[in-house]
Each structure stands twice: as C-alpha cells, then as structure tokens.
Image (cartoon, rainbow, N blue to C red):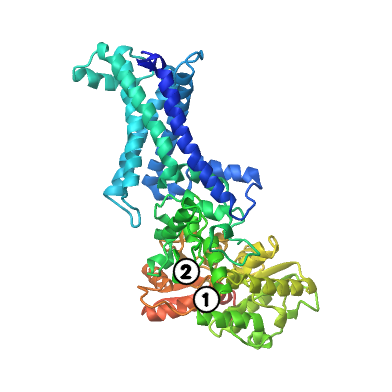
C-alpha cells in the first residue's frame, strides 16, 4: 500500500499531518488549559492520597466498566465501545507519529499482524455496540436520556472512525490479502462485487486512511467544546473519587460562587455524561420534587464553562432554593453514577449557604433550634431520654460510672418517639437475654448531628459531635452498638470511631451464630427487608440483617430494588423535620411500602428508627394498614428468642 506520509497534494502528506495536528492539539490544549485555570480558582481539596486504592478504582470502573454492567446489555455495549476507543486511540497515535516522522524505521499500525487483527475485531464489535447504543437512545429511550444533536454527532464521528478503518482494511486486502485480515478480506469481496479491483486499492486505501486521521483530529479538537468532554474527564473523575464514602467536606460556610466550591465538586460538572442514571435513581426526582441531579450537574458544567459568569453564583439563581432542599441525601445518584460524580456534597455546600442566609424551612429551623438547646430534635429535656427504661424491668448500667463491654447509643427517635420506643425496649431485653455487659449514657447522650450536618448546619454538627465525644471520653466501654444508622454513620465515619461501632443487626447476627442468643420459637412469617440508606448504601451493611431474619425462621423475599439500589424512605438530610412539599405525586415512603406489599410479604422489616416512623405513616396513607406490618429486625429477634411465659 502507498505510504500516506509520502502522498503529495502540492506538499508531502507528512506536512499536512503536522499542520492538522498542530491545529487540533492547539484547539484541544487551549480549551483544556482554560478548564484547568477555572478549577485552580476553586478551593483546594486533597485527592492524591491512597494511590493504590485510586488505581484499583480506576482499573475496576474505567477499564472494567463495573458500574455500567449493572444495566446488562447497554453495559456490555458501553464496555465494547470503550475498548474499541482504546484500541483505535492507540492505533491513531501510532500512525500519527509514524506519518509525521516518516524517517522512523517502524511500520504503520495496520501493517503489524496482531494489531491489524485487533483493530478489525474492535471495529466490528464497536460498530455492533454503537448500533445497540443508537437503538437505546433513539428507539428504546430511557427516561432522562436526551436525543441531542451533540450526542448524535458523537455517535456519527465514532462510527466514521471505525468504518473508515475497516474500509481501509478492505482496500488493503483487495491488493494484498493477509491472514490477519479476515474482516478486510470479507470487505474486499464486497468491493470486488461492486466492480473494484486491485487497481483501485491504493487510492481507496489512501482515501480511507486520511478520512480516518482527519476525523480523529477533528473529533479531538471538538471534544472539549462539547458536552462529551466527559469522555476525557470521566476517567479522572473516577480516579479522584471520594474514598471516604458519605463524609462531607468540613469547616465551610457554604458555597454558591465558583471560588467557594472545591475543584473536585466543580469537576463533577465536566465529568457528567448527562446519561440520566442519577435521575432514574433519585427518589426526590421520581416523586415529583423539584430536583434533578442531572440538571444540577449541567448547571455546574455551565458555571465551569463560563468561568464563573457574572459572579452571581448558583444558589437561588441557576439552582433554586426548593431544588437544594429537595435532596434526601440518600446517595442513590452517586451510587448509580458511572463517573463517580458527587451530587450530595454539592447540595450540602449550597444548603450551608442557605442556612447562613437564614433561608430555612420553618419546621426544620425549629428542629435545629431544639438540637442546639436540648441535644435532641424533639425539644424535650435530656432527662426524658430514658423514659422507656421502666418498661425493661431492669435498669441498664450507667457507662459513665462503671465499665461495660458495649456502650449502647439509642439515638433520638428510639429514645423519644413513642412509635419507636417499643423497639428500644425490645433491644434492651434481647441484650439482657444474651448476657451482654452493656450500658447507656442516660441524659449525657446527644443527637449525633448527622442530619443537622446534611441539612447544612455545620456549626451545630460540630457542637453536637464535640459534646458526644466528651461524653464518650468519660465513659468506660470496649465497643459501641446502636440501632440508628444515622448515629452509626456519624460515629464510624465522622467521629473517627471506625472499627469500634456496630449496628445492632451486626451484633444480633454474631450473637445468634455463636449460640449466645438461642432462637426458642421460629417465626412463621414472610418478611421483606428494607435497606436503610445510611446502613446500606453509605456503609455496606447488607448481609447481617438478612442473616438474622433467616436465622429467626422467617421466609425472606426481596423487593426489586434492594441492597445498593434500594429505594429511600425519604427521611434523610433533615427531611423528617421538614414540611411536605405540595404537589408531590407520591412520597418516597408510600412508594416503598407499595413495593414491599407487592412481594406478598406480611412484614416489612427495617433497621432504622426513621424508617419505622416513615413506613408506619406511609402504610396508613397507602391503605396498607392491617395488610403490611412494619417491624424492626430487633422486634423480630425479641419475639423469636423469648422463652415461654417471658415478657
């Protein structure tokens, strides 16, 4: 085949390559440099730590496309498109270097047998995957996946890159068939049937070679100016992902303008593919709240692309207050995002700004004031925290005065809410029945501050945290156990107590497995289990509650959305303290109890006091009262381990 670099159109081909490459790389570099300059104006954030873990995250989620494989066929298609892109990018730079420096004693990529075969295979598989992607986007379109001209242009350009390479292989095989060109031979046969012969091969090959190179160079120049900048940015987004899941940036007064966000928070906008997966997972969006995680990222992208614009900021302008307050902080959006964008930290930063400005829901404001004054959201005296104790029949040890093995932190709802107090009593009885050496802090326990922090009250969180840490320092214990996932998360991830904290479902699983808590009467019940967001998605505690339910003799049925994809009850992020938004189609809790009832289960088991409150109320409004009982896992354990005649 003729050497493309030696081809003359007035000047040699390698000169054209140099000119086109300089234009393409200059346009690309100028835009990328501008983005870097914008991000440098943002607040710094450490994302270079723990390199081995970041490299593993990159390998699994960029090279392996793990998150996308959760969507079966489109995940496989995306995997093939990605690896076709990798092979063709390698081939392109190889050919570009060879073409720009014809004196190099190396062949072109398609002149090396194994590489030529790999390019043919990648081209065929990539085209098949692109066809699947096109069918999905234009025929079987998921909700919130847009049919934009930009997306169409990208599909056309990628197809042209692959088709030009395969056609070039066909012309090459038309002149000199080689064993490593099975696809090229088939295409050569097609060309021959259309009247082409070996005399046409050289010109056809050159035309396809230049079409391929010009298309890729044009694609490269266009990429950073389009929404598909994510094709480049997403790989870095995964590498710079948050490793301490669910931990929020500390010590800020909120953000609205470009300079007030961290560079990684802003980078999420560039990495966003606008695929709509976050919206399809968001309980707020799907329930009719004025929040679209995808649109949020789009506004951040516009902020970065505009370099900060007129300085007006996002809060109250591009992103409305009601949008910021709609988030329930369940992190379903972040769990589903294939490029590891961080929607929740962005929204919490904006909430902090609203709190600083006094723009807070009235009921939320009351709850926050109660937390600051009384240490609980109910506005009750700390002495009322243990009003449930007499129902136990014994008085738990005071861990401030005597050493215990387990310090039990109940959390606010388990201590003060009459609807949850029976669960707390059941837990105390089970702990006593298992012979645990446990105690409580009595009035010294305060709200963990988890929800206050996610509602944007960072200063209040710090006050509550410091008070609780002071109480923990005075107590004598080996481990902490709690039935409140919000308390669990705060202690484990934001108080620095990781390794010393158990959710009581984890403890129950250990006690039953070791024989310390014998099951005296099997539960003859059909149960479905709800994975609370702060226990499951935030902290990965999925199996212990299920092991407990099955060990108690119940039959466990799973809801379609379970474990990491579980639906949220709608209480998180301070929403349990907020007024209902008018016009909501169906509250998240109502949708979840309907989903639970549809399994045929008689019991919806939970492991969170807020789930108990939300689902009991939702079962009434959904007309399921009497058909679906909401029970805590601890209540089921207390019933199954109760001896005959025991209370």
For residue 160, side relative to residue 470 (left or right):
left
Q: Nearer the viewer, residue 553 or 213?
A: 213
On screen, 185 above or below 612?
Answer: above
Residue visible at 57% across and 69% down? Answer: 352
Q: Are marks 2 and 1 in contact (CB under 8 Å)?
A: yes
Residue on which the image places disc 2: 316
Across and down, in percent, residue 5 comes to: 41, 17
Viewport quadrant of the N terminus: top left
Examine the image and state in which quarter residue 543 appears: bottom right
Examine the image and state in which quarter residue 208 appears: top left
Residue visible at 52% across and 51% down? Answer: 267
Across and down, in percent, residue 127 comes to: 33, 35
Across and down, in percent, residue 213 comes to: 39, 27
Q: Secondary structure at mark 1?
A: loop
On screen, 639 above or below 134?
Answer: below
- Quick one: label 2 or label 1, which is nearer the N terminus? 2
Alpha-carbon span between mark 2 and mark 1: 10 Å
Residue visible at 40% across and 81% down? Answer: 620
- In the rendered image, is residue 371 in sight? yes
Q: Nearer the viewer, residue 552 or 80?
A: 80
Q: Residues within 10 Å of mark 1 (few under 14, many from 20)?
A: few
Q: Secondary structure at mark 2?
A: loop
């Amino acid at each position: 085949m003729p050497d493309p670099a030696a081809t003359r159109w007035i000047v040699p081909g390698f000169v054209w390559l140099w000119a086109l490459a300089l234009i393409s790389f200059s346009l690309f570099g100028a835009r990328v440099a501008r983005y870097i300059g914008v991000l440098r104006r943002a607040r710094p954030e450490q994302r270079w730590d723990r390199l081995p873990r970041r490299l593993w995250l990159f390998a699994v989620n960029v090279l392996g496309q793990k998150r996308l494989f959760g969507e079966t066929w489109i995940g496989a298609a995306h995997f093939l498109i990605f690896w076709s892109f990798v092979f063709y990018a390698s081939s392109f730079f190889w050919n570009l270097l060879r073409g720009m420096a014809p004196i190099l004693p190396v062949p072109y990529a398609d002149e090396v047998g194994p590489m030529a075969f790999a390019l043919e295979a990648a081209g065929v598989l990539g085209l098949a995957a692109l066809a699947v992607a096109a069918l999905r986007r234009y025929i079987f379109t998921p909700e919130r996946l847009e049919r934009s001209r930009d997306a169409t242009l990208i599909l056309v350009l990628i197809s042209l890159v692959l088709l030009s390479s395969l056609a070039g292989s066909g012309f090459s095989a038309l002149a000199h068939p080689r064993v490593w060109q099975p696809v090229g031979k088939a295409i050569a046969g097609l060309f021959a049937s259309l009247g082409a012969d070996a005399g046409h091969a050289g010109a056809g090959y050159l035309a396809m070679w230049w079409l391929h190179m010009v298309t890729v160079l044009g694609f490269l120049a266009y990429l950073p100016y389009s929404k598909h900048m994510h094709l480049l940015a997403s790989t870095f987004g995964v590498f710079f992902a948050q490793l301490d899941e669910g931990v929020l940036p500390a010590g800020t007064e909120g953000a609205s303008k470009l300079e007030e966000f961290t560079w990684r928070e802003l980078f999420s906008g560039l990495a966003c593919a606008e695929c709509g997966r976050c919206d399809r997972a968001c309980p707020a969006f799907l329930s009719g709240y004025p929040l679209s995680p995808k649109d949020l990222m789009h506004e951040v992208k516009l902020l970065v692309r505009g370099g900060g614009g007129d300085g007006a900021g996002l809060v109250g302008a591009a992103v409305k207050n009601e949008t910021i307050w709609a988030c329930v902080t369940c992190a379903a959006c972040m769990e589903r995002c294939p490029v590891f964008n961080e929607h929740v930290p962005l929204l919490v930063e904006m909430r902090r700004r609203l709190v600083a400005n006094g723009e807070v829901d009235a009921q939320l404001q009351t709850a926050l004031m109660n937390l600051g004054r009384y240490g609980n959201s109910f506005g009750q005296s700390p002495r009322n925290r243990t009003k449930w104790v007499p129902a136990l029949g014994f008085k738990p040890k005071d861990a401030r005065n005597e050493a215990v093995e387990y310090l039990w932190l109940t959390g606010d709802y388990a201590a003060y809410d009459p609807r949850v107090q029976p669960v707390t009593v059941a837990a105390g009885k089970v702990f006593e029945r298992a012979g645990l050496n446990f105690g409580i802090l009595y009035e010294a326990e305060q709200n963990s501050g988890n929800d206050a922090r996610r509602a944007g009250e960072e200063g209040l969180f710090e006050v509550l945290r410091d008070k609780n840490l002071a109480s923990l320092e005075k107590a004598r214990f080996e481990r902490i156990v709690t039935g409140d996932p919000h308390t669990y998360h705060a202690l484990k991830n934001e108080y620095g107590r990781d390794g010393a904290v158990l959710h009581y479902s984890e403890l129950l699983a250990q006690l039953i497995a070791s024989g310390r808590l014998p099951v005296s009467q099997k539960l003859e019940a059909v149960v479905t289990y709800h994975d609370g967001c702060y226990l499951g998605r935030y902290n990965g505690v999925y199996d212990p509650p299920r092991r407990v339910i099955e060990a108690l003799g119940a039959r466990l049925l799973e809801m379609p959305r379970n474990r990491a994809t579980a639906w949220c009850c709608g209480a998180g992020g301070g929403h349990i303290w907020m007024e209902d938004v008018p016009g909501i189609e169906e509250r998240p809790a109502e949708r979840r109890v309907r989903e639970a009832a549809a399994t045929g289960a008689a019991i919806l088991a939970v492991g969170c006091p807020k789930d108990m409150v939300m689902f009991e109320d939702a079962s009434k409004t959904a007309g399921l009262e009497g058909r679906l009982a909401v029970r805590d896992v601890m209540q089921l354990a207390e019933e199954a381990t109760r001896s005959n005649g025991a209370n």
